[in-house]
Image: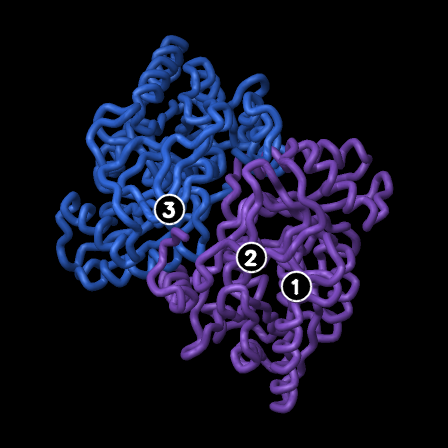
Chain colours: A blue, B purple
Amino acid sequence: MKKIMNQPSAIVDEMIQGLTKSYPDYVSRLENTNVIVRSDLKNMSQTVGLVSGGGSGHEPSHAGFVGEGMLTAAVCGEVFTSPTPDQIFEAIKASDTGKGVFLIIKNYSGDVMNFDMAKDMAEMEGIKVDSIIVDDDIAVEDSTYTQGRRGVAGTVLVHKILGGLAAEGASLEEISDFAKQLVPQIKTIGLALTGATVPEVGKPGFVLADDEIEYGVGIHGEPGYRKEKIKTSYEFGQELIGRLSKEFQFKQGDTYGVLVNGLGATPLMEQFVFINDVLNQLDETGLKIAFTKVGNYMTSLEMAGISLTLIKLENRYLELLNKSVHTIAW
Amino acid sequence: MKKIMNQPSAIVDEMIQGLTKSYPDYVSRLENTNVIVRSDLKNMSQTVGLVSGGGSGHEPSHAGFVGEGMLTAAVCGEVFTSPTPDQIFEAIKASDTGKGVFLIIKNYSGDVMNFDMAKDMAEMEGIKVDSIIVDDDIAVEDSTYTQGRRGVAGTVLVHKILGGLAAEGASLEEISDFAKQLVPQIKTIGLALTGATVPEVGKPGFVLADDEIEYGVGIHGEPGYRKEKIKTSYEFGQELIGRLSKEFQFKQGDTYGVLVNGLGATPLMEQFVFINDVLNQLDETGLKIAFTKVGNYMTSLEMAGISLTLIKLENRYLELLNKSVHTIAW
């Protein structure tokens, strides 16, 4: 393992220090916690607070999406480890302006349990809390840490769209209803070229041969659905779009948005080559693409690979995706 | 070699297609060239055009910095290969609104020669052209492809600051004078954990042992100044700041900006840990830090490693760094 770090056990704390010192105009750390909040929290208008988070190692998720128009707070767990309920509770308390707090939870059993416990704690203190579970990864049903499907890069689109809605002054109930419609319209599938190494473990979570890739690997290295020899970007596009097509039941003329997400070590050059194939193939399928984004948004430490997220652009999704925000990483 | 691509020989063309299809509101491709221009070029106010570029493989440099307030055009060479004079000439012609064009050239012999030839071609057509060579990398004197010092991540700060100046309507002469003052105030040094593989070559440009790093490696894998066993982030900070300190002759109370740049495969987590050490150490030295930025700005394909750039914030540099721009990657 070669990593730029000091003590593995201190890596999340030092990351948070580096983040908040580097971007004080965007984010601050809630004292004595691993919670990142908007640095303009005290001047935030009276809107519903949006809280997300999860294990660290997926940067810029989620702290990079804290700021005006997106998240109010992000809770940073240890690497690939759910944040504890007390930390989430602190994030909820800090994010409540009286209109309540909405939690965006990626579907991992630990996250779901701990966010739920924090919700109970907050409700006992009289804070209105509601939540949505994001389970956009269509690769596999049930997984190492998940019942059902995992939550991955599509979560960032949920942050963006609900963030836009919250900024308009929507109520907790409106956001909750909107989220229930939104999440099923976002689906993701990926592939990995290499595994990632958790600093405190010191060796990769899985190993692929020099000419091998794996489809459907999770962002914590959870097993995917097939290993095979590396193919072309075009063929990767066919495989991933084929799976998404079955889920969405593509209809000619329907409008979608595309997010190509790098998993950490994949150069932007390869991500742009890949989205070129994806956009060409979706065009041949007769879909309209009205939104595109390419880059590292939901990573898995230094894993090489990509994920492809599609969002069916119904309702006001496109308008809310295009609203400007004040964050480090959107 | 595992890369997400089709034919290695087509990788730059396909990258440009993917980039321009994904971000049509930001950038367009000049027909039949590998030149990226602002997509609002026709409505650009009558300002000096700013052109940069170089070999591909450093994404988001330089195309990610094309847009209002930064570059007018970026020329994409083949991977780690200077763009040809005819391509640069096309970029110059497209960028001229009558006030002339300023070229920002990283110091590699091929780039310097080809940008100079393009300048001559443009001047023969009556376009006023001036240029600056960026040689911010203090690691070594002379290098595989360079006389003197190499141009690396600090170039992005030159794009930003001169872009701000050009947008204000500064003349070609004013920009040229400003650039000559600016470039010596920007210095960079880096370290690599792994090498990068050029797609058409198929194997890494250099190899480091599993516990080894190299200081001062160039963004094309040019040799650095020392290999040694991996140390802590804190010790990396001491080494790199020590070298920068000698160059700048740090004085207590002086104000600097800091750019920590990931070379491609280094997770943001590690970059934030590193900048935390850097900011702590600069604070102990008595410097004031008024600008910070962290992320992948000038990469070397999938190289793991980081560079540290300092800029001495004199003149109007800070104000120009903080101006808002419309680009994909700033």
Q: Mark 2 points at which residue?
A: B325
Q: Residue at x 58, y 59 (%)?
A: B220
Q: What residue type is labelled 3?
A: Asp
Q: Is mark 3 on a helix, strand or loop?
A: loop
Q: Residue at x 30, y 20 (%)?
A: A109
Q: Which amino acid does label 2 sit on?
A: Val
Spot occupied by residue B42 in the image (x, y as percentages of width and height): 48, 75
Q: Mark 1 points at which residue?
A: B144
Q: How crowded is mark 3: few (under 14 residues within 10 Å), some or many (20 or more)?
A: few
Q: Can residue A132 be seen in this view?
A: no
Q: Which amino acid does label 1 sit on?
A: Thr
Q: In which quarter of the image is residue A289?
A: bottom left
Give whichever of A326, B314 is nearer the camera. B314
Q: Are marks 2 and 3 on the same chain?
A: no
Left/right of residue A118 with respect to residue A309 in the rendered view: right
Q: Name the residue under label 3.
A: A210
Q: Quadrant of residue A215?
A: top left
Q: Is residue A60 visible?
A: yes
- Chain containing mark 3: A
Give whichever of A141, B30 is nearer the camera. A141
- Chain containing mark 1: B
Spot occupied by residue B125 in the image (x, y as percentages of width and height): 61, 90
Q: Residues within 10 Å of mark 1 (few under 14, many from 20)?
A: few
Q: Which residue is drawn at 57% across and 41% down?
A: B209
Q: In which quarter of the image is residue B50?
A: bottom right
Left/right of residue A32 with respect to residue A314 in the rendered view: right
- Chain containing mark 2: B
Report, in whole angstroms, how far the alpha carbon at label 1 lies from the one at label 2.
Answer: 35 Å
Residue sitting at the far top? A124
